[in-house]
Image (tube, grey):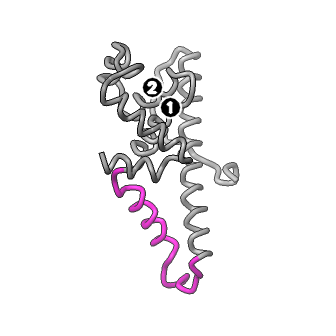
Amino acid sequence: MRGTINVITRIARSMNERLDAVAEVERYKMKVGIYGGYDITYAAQRLSPAEWWIQVNYQQAETNPLAYVAVRVLSQTTSSSPCERNWSTFSLIHIKIRNRLGVDRLEKLVYCHYNMRLRVKQKEERQKIERRKFMQLAGRRFEEVVPEIDVDELL
């Protein structure tokens, strides 16, 4: 319970929210109120933990402070993949030729490069959806094609 209280203390936004979240932990453990219903128990078996806590929060009239903390904790990345991706981008930009870049400038370039890749990915997904809709309207079968993306269009 000490670990739970430490997490609530760090994530909760105010003292009142902390106290409400700790009280809500007791209701959760005892399965009192919203936590004891059949629908919530069934949903816990079917949904991911973060989705379940989001549902718990929406089923109450007021915001559930424990649900807020739980969603924040469960939404954290549990692998090093995003860090590895960022370091990969960093190594692409920071080469021998650009060795004199300052830390701030380098961080901004990595940020821009990473966001550019995200935009390209979003653009590809939008084009894929548009092609799929077009093919469905035309009555033809959808085939995966690698799209050509105009980089100037992303800016």
88 magenta-colored: yes
Residue closest to the eye, 28 or 149: 28
* Figure check: 52 above or below 120: above
Quarter assignment of residue 27: top left
Q: Which residue is drawn at 46% across and 63% down?
A: 86
39 magenta-colored: no
State the quadrant of the N terminus.
top left
Q: Which residue is drawn at 64% across and 50% down?
A: 150
Among all residues in the image, which is located at the extreme bottom? 100
Image position of 70 (left or right of 113): left
Residue annotated with mark 2: 56
Residue annotated with mark 1: 64
Quarter assignment of residue 137: top right
Residue 78 is labelled as none
Q: Residue at x 45, y 38 (%)?
A: 21
**Residue span colored magenta:** 78-103
Q: Which amino acid does label 2 sit on?
A: Val
Q: How crowded is mark 1: few (under 14 residues within 10 Å), some or many (20 or more)?
A: many
Q: Which residue is drawn at 37% across and 19% down?
A: 40
Q: How far apart are marks 2 and 1 (CA)?
A: 8 Å
